Image (cartoon, grey):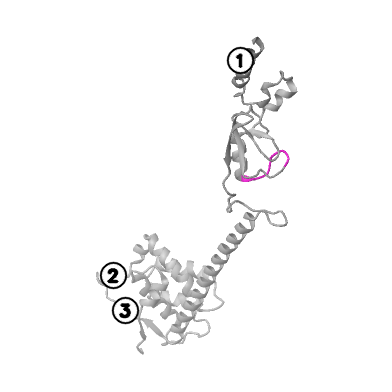
Amino acid sequence: MHKATASPPSKRIKLESSPTPDLDSQSSPRDEDQAAEDHCSICLQSLGDRAVIPTCSHDFCFECILMWSEQSRKCPLCSQLIGEYLIHHIRSKYDYQKHYLPPPRTSSPQLLPTGENRTRPLRNVRRERQWGRRARQEQDQADQLDRAIARRRWLYEHDLYAKHVASNSFTRYRPYPAPSQFSASPDLISRMTAFLRRELQVWPNLDVEFLTTFTISIMKSIDIRSESAVKLLSEFLDMDAPYVEGHRHVNAEHFAHEIYSYLRSPYRDLNTYDSLAQVEMRPAV
């Protein structure tokens, strides 16, 4: 009778000791080598909420292996497939929970058959598209500039002058600035520099940068349409047509008039000015 009553207490003691995280805690005391096995191979810390991979029985911290599974579905130690779930909250051999893993993310970086990451080629493709888009934009701008220069050259060849527009609040045209006003206005100088750099390309083989600076310096000193200014410009623009007494400096006079017309206009963008400016034949003198 004494032996029959002694067995239940021993069973209760065994169940009470079972909730410890390590299932081996019911066995004999472990040495230092066995204690090292209580550390997670991912974070190298003591196991917290011990989780076991059912396919290979390797154990890790539940949070560690859960984060690992978001990147890889293979065991960090033996590379076996993890499977559909993890075992954690282990209280005894038959008392635990299963945590089912979500399907792998399809948006995660995938490896090509060569072992390369698919992300890098995609980045290269996007970069090439940006470069291609930028190259097309630059080419479109170059084509637009070529068309604008060709149109301006055609106006000079046919002696077509920009029409005079009255200065008022409706047209927003302003009186032509005096040399002192032009010199003191960085905005006017900036606008005129852009205009000259394009306009001087009408004539081939000219030093555009030099003539731009030269013309700006003339405008800071005298009226661009004055006889002395036209003569200075004709030294470069009318070299193929030597001046004859009583005749015109055709290109220089036309060039000075276009400078005068553009600088009075309210438009900074050259393409906008081209689309809105009207032209007329210069009356014979």
User: Can the viewer see residue 249 in this picture?
Assistant: no
Res. 21 image quadrant: top right
**Amino acid carrying mark 1 in the image:** Pro
> In the picture shown, does residue 39 fall above or below 171?
above
Crowding at label 3, few (<14), some or many (≥20) Cα neighbours within 10 Å?
A: some
Q: Position of residue 191 (x, y in %)?
A: 41, 66
The residue drawn where x is 58% and y is 44% is: 101
Q: According to the image, label 1 marks what residue?
A: 9
Q: Secondary structure at mark 2?
A: loop
The CA span between labels 2 and 1 is: 106 Å
Position of the N terminus, as image quadrant, is top right
Between 9 and 129, the one nearer to me in the picture:
9
Q: According to the image, label 2 marks what residue?
A: 172
Position of the C terminus, as image quadrant, is bottom left
Q: Position of residue 32 (x, y in %)?
A: 73, 20
Segment tinted magenta in the rendering: 71-78
